[in-house]
Image (cartoon, grey):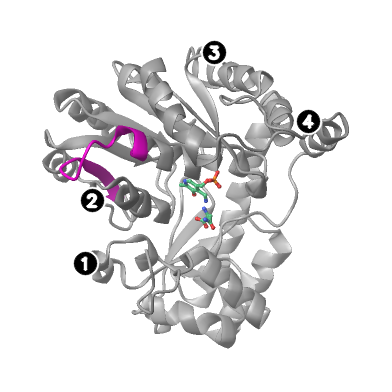
Amino acid sequence: LLAADGTVAPTIFAEMSAAAARTGAINLGQGFPDEDGPAEVLEAARRAIADGANQYPPGRGVPDLLAAISEHQHRFYGLDVDPGTEVIVTAGATEALTATLLALIDGPDDEVVVFEPYYDSYAAAVALAGARLRTVPLRAPDFQPDLEQLAAAVTDRTRIILVNDPHNPTGAVFGREVLVEVVRLAQQHDAVIVTDEVYEHLSFHSPHTPIATLPDAAERTLTISSAGKTFSTTGWKIGWIHGPAALITAVLTVKQYLTYVNGSPFQPAIAVGLRLDDSYFSNAATELARKHQILGQGLRAAGFTVHPPRGGYFTVADATALGGADAAAFCRALPERAGVVAIPLSAFVSPEHREDYAGLVRFAACKRIDVLEEAAARLTRYS
Ligand code: PMP
Ligand code: GLN
């Protein structure tokens, strides 16, 4: 995790946001919205601070938020989650993932199977936990896994199958047959399914299907989500994880020594968010889908080949026709030359597989429409 010179290497997101700040470029790199989320949620946090919610909350999380998560999972997916034993609040999805890996990995022979490209903290957390990463490739244009490759990757050494759906960075939403196969393989090899569903409310063409709703899945599935994406509060770092009580107890055991607790006034505010009307959630998906469309049009006009996403914050585009066959070099030059920041897909891939994704670039669409239009205009001028 250290850079070659022994200093701490910044994450790709920090590096690209710094490039945007330095050059004044439009930041379509790091995935964070440039507009605030629902006023009710922001107001509830202010109220919670004024009302004195400023000390350590309970270790599992504020009871009102635990109840709201349980209600949310029942309302949207028909899942029954006991708020007392089967859910905990975490410092974002990031802590939920890391605490889970630290809790469940027994030793260096344990393997974690992930789809590649993958969100950057996965490989780091697997390394921290001392396990081995096994990857299953997702390839353009639809970024669905080959089920035979998936089956070949899962063995009796597999401790965890780690899924992210909707998927960062590719924008894939996995077909039901993929999710069913994940459950079958987990059962066959007695693995735990860890599913990162932070973009659960940002699926554009079909309702989100949590893996935990599939037959025989709930008993071996830990479901992770985060308020950051759903309520445009990425800086609040309120996430959660739910699943069988024994697994949640194991994760809590680690979490209590990682951060202990987090986000006292933000927790009741997110409870307010999770109880908003259905229209809030469906509008969030519709608005983001529209932004992807505008971004996609702009990228096509600039000469990219666009792989339209089915969910999440990001559109992936092929830059080869613009001289971006080496997308890493292309993205390094882009802030100065075009005034836009984007991230090469190779940043989400193990070093030995970078060539397979060489021409692909990830653009964040979770920005104001005028910002996306300006970015598209700059890219068109540049091309
Ligand atoms: N998983 C995925 C797939 C993400 O995209 C992100 C954030 N961009 C996270 C986890 C981290 O979420 P949080 O900020 O809640 O820790
Ligand atoms: N998840 C965000 C992304 O993919 C960034 C989060 C971070 O900076 N760690 O862009």
Quick one: SS at disc 1? Answer: helix
In which quadrant is the N terminus drawn?
A: bottom left
Magenta region: which residues? 101-115
Task: Report if residue 295 is visible in the image.
Answer: yes
CB within 8 Å, label 4 to label 2? no
Quick one: SS at disc 3? Answer: loop
Q: Nearer the viewer, mark 4 or mark 2?
A: 4
- Local packing at callout 4 (Cα closer than 10 Å; few below 14, some 14-19, many 20+) is some
The answer to which of marks 1 and 2 sits earlier in the sequence is 2
Task: Report if residue 176 is visible in the image.
Answer: no
Quick one: SS at disc 4? Answer: loop
Q: Amino acid at mark 1?
A: Glu
Q: Is residue 382 above or below residue 138?
A: below
Q: Is residue 18 magenta?
A: no
The answer to which of marks 2 and 3 sits earlier in the sequence is 3
User: Residue 28 at x, y = what percent?
Assistant: 58, 66
Q: Quadrant of residue 30?
A: bottom right
Q: Amino acid at mark 2?
A: Thr
The answer to which of marks 1 and 3 sits earlier in the sequence is 3
Q: Which residue is mark 4?
A: 53
Q: Which residue is mark 3?
A: 84
Q: Quadrant of residue 22?
A: bottom right
User: Residue 293 at x, y = what percent?
Assistant: 57, 56
Residue at image coords 67%, 40%: 231
Q: Which residue is mark 1?
A: 352
The answer to which of marks 4 and 3 sits earlier in the sequence is 4
Q: Which mark is residue 135?
A: 2
CB within 8 Å, label 2 to label 3? no
Is label 4's Cβ within 8 Å of ligand 1? no
Is label 3's Cβ within 8 Å of ligand 1? no
Residue at image coords 86%, 32%: 47
